[in-house]
Every structure is written in C-alpha cells, then in structure tokens.
Image (cartoon, rainbow, N blue to C red):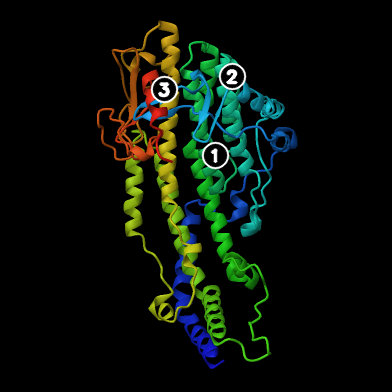
Amino acid sequence: MAVAGFFVLISGSLVVTQRIEPGNELGAYKMRLRARGEKLDLAEVLPAPVAPEDNAASAVEQAFALFGSGTEDVPDAMTMVAPGRALVGWSQSEVRDYDFTNTWEEFAARVDADRPAIELLQQVLARPRLDFGLDYKKGAQLRLPHLEPLKHAAQKLTAAAIMELHNRDDGAAATNILTLLDLVHKNAMEGLLISYLVRMAITEIAVIPTWELLQTTNATEAQLAALQKGWQQMDFLEDAKNAFVTERAWGANEIQKARASHEAYREAIGLRSASSAVSSSGSGGPANWHDFIDRARATAGEIMFRSSWSYADELNRLQIDQTILEAVRAMQTNRSGNYKADYDAMVARFSKLHVADARGSFFRALDIPDHGELWTWNPSSNLQKTLRMEAARLIVVTAIALKRFQLKHDQWPESLTEVVPEFLPSVPIDPYDGKPLRYRPNGDGTYLLYCVGKDGVDDGGDPTCPPSAIYWPNPMARDWVWPQAATPAEVEYFYAHPPKK
C-alpha cells in the first residue's frame, strides 16, 4: 500500500508543474486557430442533416441485406501479369482467381443471385445523398456497420460488370461501374477518416471494371462520356479536407471527454469494465503484490493524464491535424498541380513541429502508462494515399478520353493536346511533378500513359516494380504506367507460373 500511495502522491505533486504550461499553450493555440476562422468544436463541423427524400441510405441498407451467398469473388480482371501488362478478365475462356476456377455459366448463376440487390442499388442511388446518420458524439462507442457492406457491394458490382462485359453488354457494365462510383461520391460528407479510407479503397476497386470496359470494342460514346463524368466528379482533395476537419474535432473531443470522466478515460484506452477489483488468493489472503503495483501505476497514469498530460496531447493532436489540413488546402489552390511539393513541405514542417512532452523521464522510469499513442498520431500516410488516388483518377479519366478520341477518329492521338477541349477540358497535370501526364502512341496500336509516381522522377514510362507487388497503381513502381492488354502468350505464361501469394 505504501508503494501505491507513493505513486499517487508523486503524481499529485507534479500535476501543477506539468499542467500549467501545456494548458496555457493549448489555450493560446486554439485562440490563434479560431482567429483564423478554424472550426474546432465537433458541433461546428458536422454535416447538416439530410432530408429523408434525398437520402438513399435506408434503401441502400436494404440492398445490402439482399446480397445473398452469391460470389464476392472477382475473377482475374485487370490482373497484372507483368509490369505494364494486364490480362483482360472478361475475354478469358474461364473464370479464375487464385482460389477458384469456374465456367462462365457457373459464375453467371452466382452473379444472377445478386441482381435484385444490384437493381435496387441502381434505383435508389438516383437520390443525391448517402448519409448513414452517424452519431459522432458517441466517440469510441461509435459503430460503423455500413463500411464492410459498402466494400462488399463494390465487389459484387465489379463481379457483375465483368460478367456483363463477357456477355458483350457494355451498357449494363457501365451502369454497374457508375453505381459503384455513386457509393463513393454520394457518401463523401461522412467525415471520419476511416470512412474516407474505405471510400478510397472502393474507388481502387472501381478502377478494375473501368479498365476492363476500355478493352472492349462495343462501348459507345454515350457510355464512355457518362463513365468519364462519373470519374471526373470524384474530388479526393475536398473529401480529404472534410475528413481531416472532422477528425480534428472528433479527436480533440475524445481527449476532452477522457479528461473529464473516469469512465470515458477507461473506455478510450480499452478498459471496458468499470470494476477494478484487485485479484486475491482463493483463501482470502492478501492480493498479489504485482497487482497492487500495476494498479498504482494505472491510477497514477490516469491522474496525470486527466490533470496534465491530456493538455499536451490535445495540443499535439491539433498541431498535427492543422499541418495536414494546411497541406490539403495548399494542394487545392496549387495552380501548378504539383501536389508532391505541398506534401514535401508538410513533411518538412512536421520535422520542425514543436511537440509538447509533459510526461518526462521520471514517469517513464517508474513505468507509468501514458497511452500517448492513442492521442498523438501522424496520419500523413493517408494524405499520401490521397495523392495516389488522385493520380489514378486523372489517369483513368485520361484513358477514357483517349478511348473516346479513338472511337471517333479510329486512331490514337499524337499528343494529349489533340484531346482538348472536346474530350478533356485541359491536359491533366501529374500531381507528382506538376508537368502534363506523359503520353505517346506506340507503333503496335497501343499507347503509353503514365505519371512519374511518388519519387517525382520521370523514368521514361518504366513500370518496373518488385515482383511480389505487381498491381496498379503500385507506389513502389518506378513510373505508374496505365497497363496495356497482355497478349495470349503472356496470359498463358502467367497462369503456368503463378505468382506466390
């Protein structure tokens, strides 16, 4: 008991000395942000309620429930058989993936089982919004049961699109792809970062059937124009800004709740039970000594967090989120289109960021738990994913525009300037170096289209990447090359020498 009392006494004596400075810094920083027009409170940043007649969420959930035991498997489609070369899934003689092989007839029966759900999705997504009514104030108690079904629906729509392409029904395939994009676009106001990451994951899924459709010869101008519009309406930077603004307020709110309440503190660090009975021997003897020590340390850690450390944690969280937000806003106003420069500037600011550390070596020496990793984190890698998806979006839009040009002129353009303004409003800019996307027609009836990738270096359209990670867009590739269709010989070799999983 004396040791436990020592921990608590020391914590109490240091509260005042470790509380004043970070608390004052936090208050001053908040004042500066608010003076610049920043909205820091959760209530200020939440989206306005959606009128029921405009909200497709309840009907979409009905569609989710209709998806039965039909396949989630997407057949090999846009599967990279070599750097820069992908097999056309719908044109293969059978339906394959790494863990199944079916005939097209078998696969069609499984896809047909999902048609009622798909048709309902197509119908209800004519409404302008998809709002699942999240109660952000629940904090750690907030559940997001719709995210997995969203991704599940994206896989179902992709499988259906590949099946339609195999049946040479490009119009139905295009409708499925547009429905998939609507799941992302109409849910864009859902501000949590995890929701944003799921939307980007769904968009990556949408690349696959889009590429597959561009390998057909039956697509019409109207279908391609609609598909291009669907991709053009995706705004990853605006979506990222909304997510980071909400996440900033949400994270600060969680710290404030944990500071104010013992229950909220324990819940935040994963201690679901409010009881904290000390274990004792079966004979009713004294409690285990180590339990007393651990209990004392946990109590001291809570005292210090709620009275002192939480102010430094909240300050650090706000500084990190603000730095990322400023980078996103700089990208939105960057006329050169070189988003990598804004990202690199953000990384440099992180290295100079003042990080308040109220804990000190004394508490670490005593092994007092601080759980600082719960509150102060660096989501800059998520902004890197945003840049990758923006580059992918620009390449997809450009590839669709090139297909429209080829459909009209029966040849590929000599340069992207020929596609402007009929099929593109302007030549797309590579977000990794601020220069136009690289493009040139090849002599074999294909073309080369790429961005330079996250290293910002133009390697002349070299798609080389590690053999164990051939996919698109691959952040490890030298250049991010839009794949061309693999030859039958390349596909045969791929299946004869499958990559290791």
Tell me if residue 178 can be seen.
no
Three-letter amino acid code at disc 3?
Thr
Which one is earlier in the sequence, the residue at label 3 or at label 2?
A: 2
Residue 433: x and y in percent read: 30, 35
Left or right, 482 with respect to 285, comes to left
Q: How many marks?
A: 3
The span from disc 3 to disc 2 (Cα, nearest Å) is 24 Å
> Which residue does the image show at 62% across and 66% down from the upper left?
267
Q: Which residue is mark 1?
A: 199
**On screen, residue 315 above or below 400:** below
Q: Does the CB distance between marks 1 and 2 fall below 8 Å?
A: no
Residue 17: x and y in percent read: 45, 81
Q: Which residue is mark 3?
A: 398
The span from disc 1 to disc 2 (Cα, nearest Å) is 24 Å
Three-letter amino acid code at disc 1?
Arg
Three-letter amino acid code at disc 2?
Glu
> Which residue does the image show at 55% across and 73% down from the upper left?
306
Judging depth in this view, the residue of 432 and 1 nearest the camera is 1
Q: Which residue is mark 2?
A: 164
Question: Mark 3 Cα within 10 Å, few/some/many (few <14, many 20+)?
Answer: many
The span from disc 1 to disc 3 (Cα, nearest Å) is 21 Å
